[in-house]
């Protein structure tokens, strides 16, 4: 079952995202960001639960993008607990993300994926996503 995220899901979401993130996540910063996104109209956060346990998370940002000329939903986070990655949790989360994006007036949905997550790339391509952009990151913190 997918439902909107709540503040009480914070620790479970932190755990799931920490498992797959290439970065070491600071819990305090994560918590502030998570709460801020829950309270922001343009952010749509979804939780997948199985038997009362949080097993997946999806975060979607719906914004107008000048270069696209459209309201675009960006999947910012999609993570599944390691013990549930062979289930259909990703399918459910992606379906929910597309639904809330349409309901928010978005005409397009996009996402970024870590380069080394090749199995994820195939999953997205199998669900109709096309590679049309590159994302470039630069660490500017000293």
Image (cartoon, grey):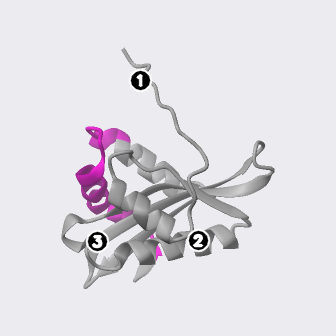
| Residue occupying the point 55% across, 40% down | 134
What is the quadrant of the N terminus in the image?
bottom left
Mark 2 residue crowding within 10 angstroms, few (<14) / some (14–19) / many (20+): many
Q: Which residue is mark 2?
A: 98
65, above or below 84, in the image: above
Which range of residues does the magenta coloring cover?
3-29
Question: Residue 65, percent across and down?
Answer: 73, 47
Image disc number at residue 139? 1
Q: Callout 3 environment at 10 Å: few (<14), some (14 to 19), or many (20+)?
A: many
Q: Position of residue 108 (x, y in %)?
A: 68, 62
**Left or right of 5, for residue 65:** right
- Horizontal arrangement in the rendering, residue 125 relative to residue 16 (left or right): right
Q: Helix, strand, or loop for circle 2?
A: helix
Identify the residue shown where x is 48% and y is 70%. Answer: 126
Pointers 1 and 2 in contact (C-beta within 8 Å): no
Q: Residue at x 43, y 51 (%)?
A: 34
Residue indicated by mark 3:
55
Q: CA distance from mark 2 to mark 3?
A: 19 Å
């Amino acid at each position: 079952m997918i439902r909107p995220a709540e503040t009480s899901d914070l620790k479970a979401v932190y755990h799931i995202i920490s498992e797959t993130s290439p970065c070491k996540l600071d819990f305090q910063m994560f918590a502030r960001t998570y709460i801020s996104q829950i309270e922001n109209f343009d952010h749509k956060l979804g939780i997948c639960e199985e038997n009362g346990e949080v097993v997946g998370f999806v975060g979607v940002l719906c914004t107008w993008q000048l270069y696209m000329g459209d309201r675009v939903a960006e999947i910012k986070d999609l993570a599944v607990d390691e013990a549930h990655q062979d289930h259909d949790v990703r399918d459910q989360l992606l379906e929910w993300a597309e639904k809330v994006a349409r309901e928010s007036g978005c005409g397009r949905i996009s996402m970024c994926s870590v380069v080394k997550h090749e199995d994820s790339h195939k999953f997205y391509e199998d669900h109709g996503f096309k590679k049309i952009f590159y994302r470039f990151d630069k660490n500017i913190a000293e």
